Image: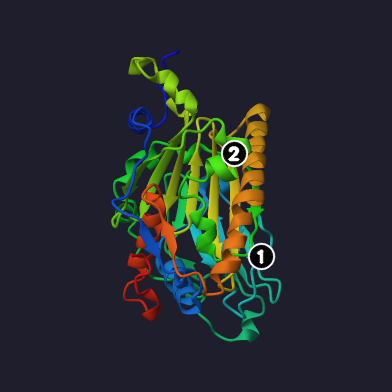
Amino acid sequence: MATDLNIQNKEFLYQAARALLDLMGRNTTDQEAAITRMDPAAYFSEERFRAEKDHLFRKTPLVVAFSCELPSPGDFRLNEEAGVPLLISRDKAGKVHVFLNACRHRAVKVTTEPCGNAARFTCPYHAWTYAADGALVALPGDDVFGEVDRSTLGLVEFPCEERYGMIFAVLTPGAQLNLAAFLGGGSTHLAEWHMERFGMVVERPLETTANWKLALDTYTENYHFHVLHAADFGYKVKNCAAHWRFGDRDQHWVLAWPSKSLETLRGVPEDQWGQVNAHFSVLYYIFPNTVLGLNADTCTAKHVWPGREVGEQTTQMKGFARTANPTPEIAAKVRERIDVFYKVLQQEDYWVCGQAWENIRTGLVPELLYGRNEPALTWLHRSLDQAMEGFSRAETARVR
């Protein structure tokens, strides 16, 4: 096996390989101390749902886009799924901004193009015009409109920070954004993926009628692979997984699970391991709603957003090459991988999510059980409960 001294995130990946080989050798998986019992009302409670939208998705740093989706000055992209109409723009100096997509005159969207490149945005109603940095630069008929201070009438801007190839924003103007604390120790290995060098290839939605957390739950464990995904993954994946947590409140986590081929490294000197993550999958959860799947040459991202109602969700699935200018062969591989994930997620995972929602929403299911072998599922809901503490009556702990 060839030695590769230029592996991105080598230290973390080799740590993961060691942990997985240990688990495989003992034929087990990382486990919680006990089974977790979940109150299904956490999914169907209207009060809880409204509180989550008002708090989690307005007060928490959210991944609203990736750097490679706006690679050049003047690039912009809309995000219509976040519950707030967002205009994400890179100004002429290269700085990213996240705005409310609303003219300061009568609140009409200043653009409805989903993405593109523009030096200015002109409202279609009365032609108020804004620069890519949000400044109001033209106000037609200002001699008859009345006296206003243009410097105070730029687009409403949200705190944002571009870091590790991701664009984070808090959807409350003037809010604090301390990304270093939010990500904590995970910053080191997130940085080593060099997502700022990625290239966007494809985007597809995933659909189901269910609460947003039911859709999110499906990414937290591989316990179901040998049943639900037997045809696509069951024959080659070992039913064990290693887990790590990070962040100022341990609200983010990493999950890795091995292919059976990882056994070929057992007994091989580590300096001959090479690209070890060809033998296992790595999944990151960035609280509260972003999931990243990082492979040796591709990356997938899923943003799971709550819909307008408690039983609605929107999932954006994106496929990236781990190079800014992928060859046709690499781009085809990304599309092929997204096609496989779409089939598995849409036809299997999101199908069972819809079935579970039909039962959970009745209020007749007494409790849900999260196994000891599903630690990330328990972590997810404990972190959600912790984030909601003190926000409203809906925040009483749901995980027991």
Provide residue 332's location: percent of width, then percent of height: 67, 32
Q: Earlier in the sequence, mark 1 or mark 2?
A: 1
In space, the residues marked 1 and 2 are separated at their CA atoms by 45 Å
Q: Which residue is mark 2?
A: 230
Q: Residue furthest right?
A: 124
Local SS, label 2: helix
Q: Quadrant of residue 288?
A: bottom left
- Taking the image as shown, residue 384 lies to the left or right of residue 209, namely left
Q: Residue furthest top?
A: 1
Provide residue 311's location: percent of width, then percent of height: 58, 70
Q: Name which residue type carries label 2.
A: Ala
Q: Residue at x 33, y 15 (%)?
A: 269
Mark 1 is surrounded, within 10 Å at the Cα level, by few (under 14), some (14 to 19) or many (20 or more) other residues, namely: some
Q: Residue at x 64, y 68 (%)?
A: 110
Q: Does 77 sit above or below residue 128? A: above
- Protein image colouring: rainbow
Label annotation for residue 111: 1
Label annotation for residue 274: none
